Amino acid sequence: MKIAFIGIKGLPSRDGASRVVENIISNLDKKNYFITVYANRTYNRQKFIESGYKQIIIPTLSLQKNINTFFYFLNSAIHALIFSDYDLIHLHNIDCAFIIPILKIKYRVICTSHGAEFSKLGKWGTFAKTYFKFMIFFFFRYSDYITSVSLPAAKYYGKMINKKIYYIPNGINLEEYCNVLKADLYLKKNNINSEFILFSAGRIIPIKGLHLLLNAYKKININEKCVIIGDLNQVNEYRIKINKLILDTNSKHIGFIRDKSELLGIISRSKLFIFPSLVENMSMMLLEVASIKTPIICSDIPENIAIFDREEVLFFKSGNEYDLADKLKWALANPEEMVLKSVNAYNKVKEKYLWSDITKQYENLYQKVLK
């Protein structure tokens, strides 16, 4: 079966949707599938050609980011339509849904939603919201099958349209290597020699809630330093705000860590992992932290509650820095209870969220499409 993936930045992965595709591919039996990935040249220029897997780099123009992304979507569709031949297309992300009618000239199309419904994202202006309304129309109207990585989103979409929404969650690989030695060297290089509390996000933007954690730090006296991992150069005003809070709280930003094993090693060394996101779909980061038995404090947004319960993580009221401060104090005063929660969370992901099992759900859908 020849399958093309369109709508991600490319592989190796840098964000959630790309990581989903990366894990699907790695768990598919290459004897039965030949995979093509359409990558955006702005983010990825590596042409991987392996057994059963290749990557096509779509050229972009030296224009504004959103325009480049638009041309990546459009050129990917044109290439697939004119220069290629697949059994089906697996499209990722709602914002590229305008190419579905183009692809449908020749192919059947499965579409996967990775992001939160656009109206929840306060940063969007009138034009962006109008654009997304059209994308949602194309997404629901022309897709042969629709999947969502979020259970709340799947239920929400199911109420919007008279079409079945397949909930297929994100997952983890328990066998992923946790490089503690490399992590320790990185921490030593950054002068982190004592116990610490950790925040990590690929892109540090307002909806990730780092400001809530740092404001909570200002309200309590704790010995553990707050260590921050991620790319802070996303929103200039927010970067300035966070840098001031870092100084006020004696926290430490140690940058973006691409190496997955090194990142997991650092997470494993942390006393607590704080996940204060205001908006998510289904966080693979939460699953990965649980897979290495690091205790978690996270916001009580529906997407997090859909994964874990109060026996597995410690929830705080979303957007409430005072409640987060209280939960931080409680967690540090009750380490045994937090360890017990982390073991329960580990057992949950081991039972329900393994990529080897989740990929089979996608395979069943692929077979269903072709029938």
Image: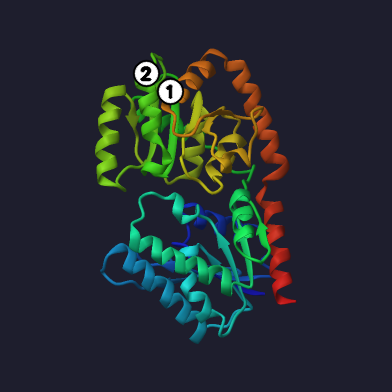
Residue 306 seen from this side: yes
**Label 2 neighbour load within 10 Å: few <14, some 14-19, many 20+:** some
Q: What element carries label 1?
A: helix
Label 1 sits on residue: 322
Query: Whole-percent x and y of residue 55?
Result: 49, 69
Say which amino acid is labelled 2.
Lys
Which residue corresponds to the image point at 53% horizontal and 16% vertical from the top-left?
A: 330
Between 306 and 156, the one lying in front of the other is 156
Near mark 1 (Cα within 10 A), the count class, few <14, some 14-19 or many ≥20, is some
| Count of marks, rendered view | 2
Report the amino acid beneath label 1: Tyr
User: Which disc, if any, is residue 219?
Assistant: 2
* Residue 269 against residue 335 in the figure, above or below: below
Where is residue 147? Give x, y as percent.
Answer: 62, 61
- Res 238 label: none
Q: Check contact, mark 1 vs mark 2: CB within 8 A.
A: yes
Residue occupying the point 57% across, 16% down: 335
Q: Earlier in the sequence, mark 1 or mark 2?
A: 2
Q: Quick check: 108 left or right of 254?
A: right
Real-space Cα distance between discs 1 and 2?
8 Å
Residue drawn at x 51%, y 37% is 264
Q: Which of marks 1 and 2 is in front?
A: 1
Q: Residue placed at 48% from the left, 60% from the top?
A: 11
Residue 331: horizontal and vertical position, in percent?
53, 19
Q: Please state the horizontal and vertical placement of residue 369, each as a whole percent of the image.
A: 70, 73
**Nearest to the observer: residue 327 or residue 294:** 327
Q: Looking at the image, which is closer to me, 179 or 74?
A: 74
- Image quadrant holding the C terminus, namely bottom right
Dot 2: what SS?
A: helix
Q: Is residue 256 visible?
A: no
Q: In which quarter of the image is the N terminus?
A: bottom right
